[in-house]
Amino acid sequence: MSQALRLLPPPIQLTDVPEPRWDHVLRLSDDTGLLEHARNAIVRREHGYCVDDVSRGLLLASREPRPAPEVLRAAERYLAFLTHAQAPDGAYRNRMSYDRRWLDEPSLGDWWGRALWGLGTAAARAAAGYLRREALEAFRISARRRSPYPRAMAFAGLGAAEVLRADPRDRQAAELLGDAATVIGLPGSDPLWVWPERELTYANPALAEVVIAAGDLLGDEALLGDGLRMLAWLCDMQGHDGHLSTVPVGGWQPGAPRHRHDQQPIEAAATADACATAAAVTGDERWDAPLFQAIAWFLGDNDTGTVMCDAETGGCYDGLKVDGPNLNQGAESTLALLSTLQHARTLAHRSATRPSGGLG
């Protein structure tokens, strides 16, 4: 297919975006937690569970304004899994086999940060009070710790931001959020490479998002400006022929050619998260455009014109390769789709209430 033919279908509209569906997430869930992998749409039990995905599941269930009973029950199981994975000193195990054996020792890797993100979101937003109370107690245990890894700190900081939005007087959350922004660092002065790191690897939008959140919630306008500048530059870097082209596996470095194969749904979801936060913090409609690009990425407005979601199962394909999708529908990718569709629902409501009735 030629590049010109790719442009023939009509552009995706906000009205084309489906509602968030929990079908496949619940298909991958059991009475222990959320299983990590699938072949096609069928769960691979031999790969077991991981805190990374269970944390994402709790986060998204907590963001549902009116969760169905089965989603609320899943949130309870996810929270129980996270409290079981938590060590008394606040570190976290990550991997459990299907026969419920932990396969690693507690540490402060990305999963520690993601657990705090999920716990903080549940503490602030879960539909049931008993979930909010338990999530906050677990959050406080792990929020005492600090990770040496910037992305782990970014994820933890985003959880702290949720707690701080719910209670602006929460000193522990404010300190964790401030420390997360400090670990990320400040953008550089070179307009060709604004990013505070020497390469773009994974979960890059989360770094900009936590700096934006820290600037907003801690009352630091300069820090807020730094975070917005980082995100604007990243969105520009990820723009390609009018659509989102996320940083792929292998990353990008300054001065090197930017390959665009092996894109992961979680990167599009992270872009949507960060742009939604920027829009909420600033009230600036200009962030709606890159947010919508992240939504449209899942619906086929991407480098290969591939629809990444399965309408039959409600799942999402695991990756976008140069020759099309990886058809497996694991937890990480499906949660990425669900997260982004949650933002689409909010964007549709915001767009409907504007005088123009449409995007920016």
Image (cartoon, rainbow, N blue to C red):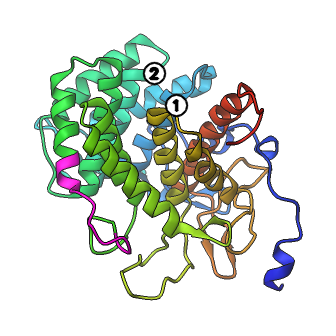
Corner quadrant of residue 3:
bottom right
Q: In the image, residue 340 lies at what x, y percent?
A: 59, 45
Query: Is residue 346 one of those drawn in magenta?
Result: no
Front residue (pair 164, 31)? 164
Q: In the image, residue 44 lies at what x, y percent?
A: 55, 59
Residue 42 lies, with reference to residue 285, above or below; the image says below
Q: CA distance from mark 1 to mark 2?
A: 7 Å
Query: In the figure, is residue 244 to the left or right of 59?
Result: right
**What number of labels is visible?**
2
Query: Is residue 183 one of those drawn in magenta?
Result: yes
Question: What amino acid type should be assigned to the residue bearing mark 1?
Answer: Ala
Q: In the image, residue 15 lies at what x, y percent?
A: 81, 41
Label 2 Cα crowd, 10 Å radius (few <14 / some 14-19 / many 20+)? many
Residue plotted at (61% across, 25% down)? 70
Can you identify the residue that label 2 sits on? 126
Q: Which residues are magenta?
A: 181-193
Q: Secondary structure at mark 2?
A: loop
Query: In the figure, is residue 315 to the left or right of 14?
Result: left
Front residue (pair 133, 70)? 133
Of mark 1 and mark 2, the one earlier in the sequence is: 1
Q: Are marks 1 and 2 in contact (CB under 8 Å)?
A: yes
Q: Which part of the image, by quadrant, shows the C terminus? A: top right
Question: What amino acid type should be assigned to the residue bearing mark 2?
Answer: Ala
Q: Is residue 31 visible?
A: no
Corner quadrant of residue 324:
bottom right
Circle number at residue 61: 1
Residue plotted at (36% across, 29% down)? 162
Q: Secondary structure at mark 1?
A: helix
Residue 177 lies, with reference to residue 301, above or below; the image says above
Corner quadrant of residue 116:
top left
Residue plotted at (84% across, 84% down)? 1
